[in-house]
Amino acid sequence: MKSRTVKIVSGLSVLGIGVAAVAVTQFAGATSKSVHSQAATGAASTTASKVVTLYFGSYSVTQNVYEKQLFPAFAKYWKAKTGQTVKFQASFDGDGSETKNIVNGLPVDVAALSLAGDMDQIQQAGLITHNWENTPTKGMVTDSIVAIAVRKGNPKHIETWSDLAKPGVEVDLPNPATSGGAKWDINAIYYATERTSGAAAAKSLLEKIVKNTVVLDKSGDASMTTFVNGTGDAAVSYENSILAASNNLKTFDEVIPSTTLLIENPIAVIDKNVDKHGDRQVAEAFVNWLETAPAQKIYESAGFRPVLKSLQASAAKKFKTPAHLLTISELGGWDKINQQLYSTNGIWNQVLAAQ
């Protein structure tokens, strides 16, 4: 197989370019593709006629489900409950970039991110002052798993993580420097292999897969778009992203390796911002509503696995269950994983340096 140079795509959200004042201006103007402004019905204040703007930030692959379904559904619910009106303004970017943007001043009231470690970063910056994990779902709003998108009929016969390293297989991956989804993907490959074959084999497999990777896109959404547009034989991604992009597997197929990783996505009110904006009531109501059955069913329709226990039995009939589903807790937690894989001298940087 001829050698290939991996193209690494990076980029900053228009909202993440610096000080809070710039972020506020961009949010208010909603001029960037990464910002969506939607008028809706529902709100929180003591005055029923008052329009309240709720600022929301999330990782890129969630954009459609929030803009097209969850914002309008919450708006309708809140309008019926309170008679109040809410206007949503939202930012969507690669997860790592979105987290940095919030820490650097992006004024979101509610953040729905990819990694628990993202919330910890925001909390360490002093923006979250409550225990965001103290909810019935432990601060998580959606679940998914790491899976592999393949072309219809699976012509390259990809069934396992190691199949991504075969000669002639082109792989699409997002970049963990900017994408939380990429960390889930790489964690799944590395730790599933380490579990059966040891650390040396896991690192070697990552090196081979990266050699088969054409583009390290800046986000999971960008990586899936690369695949949908015809580049690559396989894309490692969130299952929900694969289901959505394939129109529920009508245009391409999904492979779930026998050992993969459970994806758990957190949500939290950003205390310093809601107190500044005076919209804590609607922000907390929105987070609470997203953990209810109506919202969880919307997430499920978009390919996410529900975090609500009352819905998990019925969801199991829809979603495939791998033989073994690793969890972050089982692997020792994000602090250990980040140090081992993503620190300056971590395995991922060693893999990139070897290319």
Image (cartoon, rainbow, N blue to C red):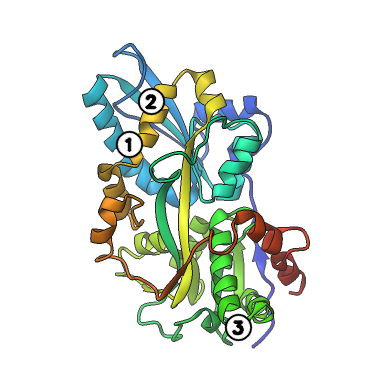
Q: In this view, does 37 lie above or below 216?
A: above
Neighbor class of circle 3 (other Cα within 10 Å; few <14, some 14-19, many 20+) is few
Label 2: which secondary element: helix
Q: Disc 1 versus disc 2: distance between alpha carbons? A: 10 Å
Neighbor class of circle 1 (other Cα within 10 Å; few <14, some 14-19, many 20+) is some
Is there any visible trace of residue 4 in the rendered image? Answer: yes
Side of 56 relative to 119 (left or right): left
- The residue where tag 3 is placed is 197
Decide which of tag 1 and tag 2 comes sooner along the chain: 2
Decide which of tag 3 and tag 2 comes sooner along the chain: 3
Residue at 60% of width from left, 67% of height from top?
A: 215
Q: What residue type is labelled 2?
A: Val
- The residue where tag 1 is placed is 289
Side of 289 relative to 275 (left or right): left
- Tell me the quarter of the picture where residue 295 sits: top left
Label 3: which secondary element: helix
- The residue where tag 2 is placed is 282
Q: What residue type is labelled 1?
A: Trp
Residue placed most toward the observer, 263 or 225 = 263
- Which marked residue is nearer to the observer: mark 3 or mark 2? 3
- Tell me the quarter of the picture where residue 67 sits: top left
Given contact means CB atoms under 8 Å apart, are the residues at marks 1 and 3 in contact? no
- Residue 279, image x, y percentages: 44, 21
Side of 257 relative to 309 (left or right): right
Decide which of tag 1 and tag 3 comes sooner along the chain: 3
**Numbered label attached to residue 233:** none
Q: Disc 3 versus disc 2: distance between alpha carbons? A: 49 Å
- Residue 200, image x, y percentages: 69, 80
